[in-house]
């Protein structure tokens, strides 16, 4: 029998995978994918609670997060494109020019 | 009382002239600049004359008119009104300043016609008129002080008129700094007066002076000595006189107006205005008389061997101002004002005459280059001769009456040591006669000594616009003395007019001399003056080579000669004793230690502290995106953990 705890555990695992990915990977595209993963982990939590509590507010939030995530992906990928055109790299460690 | 009601226009008109010429003079034609400058001064002279006639028509006891224009400063218990006050004393000064000022404005049209900065000159001159009239007409000490500073400023600006000349701008600075020393004393005196009386209005301070201040007390002595310090600065008395001879760097009409006829007499005006205070302080009176008498002689001797025609007149001015203070110091205020008036005529005439000579000599000021100008400049010669006779104290000329009155007052004076004053002043009178006629003979008699052929060919009498003021002033120098006839009872018109102003508590009783003594003193001073003239005639007319022969012999006479020519080395002494130490103290301590190490050091160390701190903090900014992400994650973990812990408890 699946309980709320299973869903929450799954979303926690996905979230941690995302965080570790953001912190350890150097490729911008992978980092952005990890951010998406974190967002979707949060979405899963929302859905779980909405189902568990029988409240539609969680669904509303999920749609909102998805919309924002889409926008973020668009902006982020545009930045990556611009970065690549200028520096021919997608390695975040090599993008530290603004540091004094 | 149309004239008295409108008296505030008298200072305002020149101010308007100054503003118009100062702001727009550059874009106006010469003739409209002249119209604004001379017109405004002429109009204010006209109003002053009407006001004077109105004042005369009043009863002798009611001759004080005060008009409050507006409240100027109101702070706590301190109130300063902007008000105009006219009484016989200020009326006399008013006429002198506007009258002589107007004549000198007219003269300047001719004298300055070829100069650069015509509008600038007249703007300054009008501003000076405004300040001087404010000084005279103000109804409280603060207004007088504003005027006092204003004339100082204009004096500075006009001395440095030829600012591209190093010596002129230095002379301007010297005058300004010297005056500031005196002004500092004046300002302290005003504060002290406010502290004691709670007011700075003449109408409050002077009538209550004898009740508020104990006669001869510390306060009144302090106040009057500080006031007198101000006067020594402005009126060029020992020890602050050295700026006046240097002030001759300015254009000659300026020397005539500011440094002879009007501004330098501001100190005399101030002392006579404050006679109610000075009467209560016998010690200060002695100081005033002593400094006056000493300056009279000291400056006269310095004028003996100057070769610059204007410098002779400058030392002569210092000396004559000494006479005025001597008169104040022995309580003969009327004589002081009388001498201010006659001096304004003959000294302005002498300065303008010297200006005319310099103009005719193409700018030459050295008397050794002059000579024989009698036939070439007849009007200048005549007017200067009259003025020279006046300043020497030859009977019927103005200077005789006023100087004689001062000598008599000094002889009879109620202050101690009056014989000393009399001797100093009489010797100074002889010296005055000598150097004035030395100037006269060197300039007008004998042969023209100029070497430059261009100068020789160009010697000419000045245009009418310059000679007419000279003639008017010469008339004054000849006849103004009859306003103060001695001996004849009631013959002293000026005394009758000014009398009420000086009837303050503690005013000295004027001892009456017997007719015989008065005549003897008169005869004595005249014969001393004639002796001075004869000696000058011998050395500079009959045997011009005698002086050089004597100097060439060396010995004592040569020492005296060089000492006098170097003005007793006073400038050098001041330089060594005051200027050099101040400069080196400023350089070695104030600049290199206080400014650089303490002031700058404090500011710089604050800045370097911030820089050091921020360079530490900067290490946290690696520029690595992943580091920031880690920090964010750790922060999130930290706060969530904190929240969980808080819930747990």
Image (tube, rainbow, N blue to C red):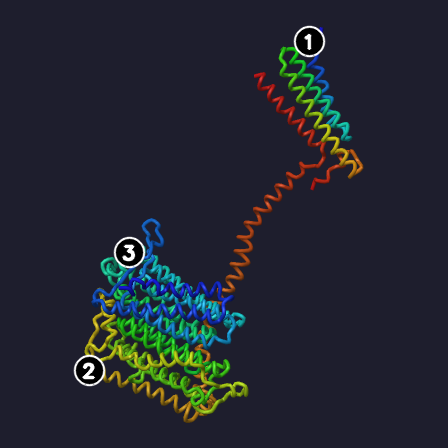
In front of the other: label 1 or label 2?
Answer: 1
Residue A36 in sight from this viewpoint: yes
Quickly name the residue at label 2. Answer: B515
Residue assigned mark 1? A3
Q: Residues within 10 Å of mark 1 (few under 14, many from 20)?
A: few
Where is residue B136 shown, x and y percent of the image?
33, 65
x and y percent of residue B619 in the render? 67, 38
Do the dots labelled 1 and 2 sit on one chain?
Answer: no
Which residue is the extreme one toward the right?
A88
* 3 and 1 marks on the same chain: no
Mark 3 lies on a secondary structure that is helix
Q: Residue at x 51, y 64 (%)?
A: B583
Cα–Cα span, label 2 and label 3:
44 Å
The image quarter in which residue A51 lies: top right
Numbered circle sitting on residue B197: 3
Q: Residues within 10 Å of mark 3 (few under 14, many from 20)?
A: some
Residue lying at the far top of the rendered structure: A1
Q: Position of residue B482 (x, y in %)?
A: 27, 80
Q: What's the chain of the residue with tag 3?
A: B
Quadrant in the rendering for residue B106? bottom left
Rounded to the nearest angstrom, the CA distance separating label 3 from label 1 is 97 Å
Q: CA distance from mark 1 to mark 2?
A: 138 Å
- The mark that comes first in sequence, 2 or 3, is 3
The number of discs equals 3
In the visual, does B23 lie left or right of B393?
right
């Amino acid at each position: 029998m699946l309980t709320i705890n299973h869903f929450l555990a799954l979303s926690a695992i996905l979230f941690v995978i995302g965080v570790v990915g953001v912190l350890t990977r150097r490729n911008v595209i992978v980092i952005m994918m990890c951010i998406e993963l974190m967002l979707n982990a949060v979405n899963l939590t929302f859905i779980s609670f909405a189902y568990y509590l029988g409240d539609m507010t969680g669904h509303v939030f999920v749609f909102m997060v998805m919309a924002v995530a889409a926008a973020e992906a668009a902006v982020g990928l545009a930045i990556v494109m611009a970065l690549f055109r200028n520096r021919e790299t997608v390695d975040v460690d090599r993008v530290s020019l603004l540091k004094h | 009382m149309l004239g008295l009601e409108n008296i505030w226009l008298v200072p305002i008109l020149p101010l308007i002239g100054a503003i118009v010429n100062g702001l727009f003079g550059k874009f106006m034609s010469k003739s409209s600049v002249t119209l604004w400058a001379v017109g405004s001064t002429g109009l204010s002279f006209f109003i002053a004359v009407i006001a004077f006639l109105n004042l005369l028509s009043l009863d002798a006891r009611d001759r004080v008119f005060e008009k409050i224009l507006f409240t100027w400063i109101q702070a706590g218990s301190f109130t300063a009104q902007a008000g105009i006050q006219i009484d016989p004393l200020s009326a006399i000064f008013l006429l002198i300043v506007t009258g002589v000022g107007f004549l000198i404005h007219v003269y300047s049209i001719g004298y300055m016609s070829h100069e650069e900065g015509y509008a600038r000159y007249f703007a300054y001159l009008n501003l000076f008129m405004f300040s001087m009239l404010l000084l005279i007409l103000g109804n409280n000490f603060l207004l007088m002080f504003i005027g006092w500073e204003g004339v100082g400023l204009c004096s500075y600006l006009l001395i440095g008129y030829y600012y591209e000349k190093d010596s002129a701008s230095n002379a301007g600075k010297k005058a300004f700094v010297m005056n500031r020393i005196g002004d500092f004393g004046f300002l302290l005196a005003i504060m002290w007066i406010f502290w004691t009386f709670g007011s700075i209005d003449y109408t409050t301070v002077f009538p209550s002076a004898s009740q508020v201040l104990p006669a001869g007390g510390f306060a009144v002595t302090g106040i009057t000595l500080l006031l007198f310090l101000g006067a020594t600065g402005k009126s060029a008395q020992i020890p602050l006189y050295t700026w006046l001879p240097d002030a001759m760097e300015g254009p000659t009409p300026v020397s005539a107006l500011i440094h002879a006829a009007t501004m330098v007499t501001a100190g005399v005006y101030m002392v006579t205005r404050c006679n109610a205070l000075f009467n209560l302080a016998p010690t200060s009176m002695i100081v005033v008389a002593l400094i006056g008498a000493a300056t009279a002689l000291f400056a006269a001797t310095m004028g003996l061997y100057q070769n610059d025609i204007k410098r002779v007149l400058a030392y002569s001015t210092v000396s004559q101002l000494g006479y005025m203070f001597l008169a104040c110091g022995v309580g003969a205020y009327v004589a002081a004002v009388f001498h201010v008036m006659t001096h304004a005529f003959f000294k302005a005439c002498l300065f303008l005459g010297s200006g005319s000579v310099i103009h005719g000599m193409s700018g030459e000021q050295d008397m050794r280059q002059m000579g024989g100008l009698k036939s070439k400049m007849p009007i200048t010669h005549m007017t200067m001769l009259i003025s020279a006779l006046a300043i020497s104290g030859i009977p019927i000329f103005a200077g005789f009456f006023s100087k004689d009155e001062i000598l008599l007052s000094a002889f009879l004076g109620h202050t101690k040591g009056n014989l000393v004053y009399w001797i100093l002043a009489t010797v100074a009178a002889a010296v005055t006669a000598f150097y004035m006629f030395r100037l006269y003979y060197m300039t007008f008699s004998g042969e023209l000594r100029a070497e430059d052929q261009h100068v020789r060919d160009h010697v000419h009498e000045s245009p009418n616009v310059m000679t007419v003021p000279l003639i008017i002033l010469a008339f004054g120098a000849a006849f103004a003395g009859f306003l103060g006839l001695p001996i004849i009872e009631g013959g002293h018109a000026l005394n009758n007019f000014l009398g009420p102003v000086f009837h303050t508590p503690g005013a000295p009783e004027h001892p009456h001399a017997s007719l015989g003594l008065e005549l003897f003193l008169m005869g004595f001073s005249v014969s001393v003056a004639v002796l001075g003239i004869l000696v000058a005639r011998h050395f500079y007319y009959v045997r011009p080579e005698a002086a050089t022969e004597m100097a060439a012999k060396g010995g004592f006479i040569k020492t005296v000669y060089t000492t006098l020519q170097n003005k007793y080395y006073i400038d050098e002494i001041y330089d060594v004793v005051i200027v050099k130490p101040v400069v080196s103290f400023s350089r070695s301590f104030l600049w290199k230690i206080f400014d650089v190490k303490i002031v700058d050091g404090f500011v710089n160390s604050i800045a370097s502290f911030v820089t050091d701190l921020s360079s530490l903090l900067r290490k946290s900014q690696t520029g690595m995106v992943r580091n920031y992400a880690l920090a964010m994650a750790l922060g999130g973990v930290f706060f969530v953990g904190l929240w969980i812990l808080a819930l747990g408890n």
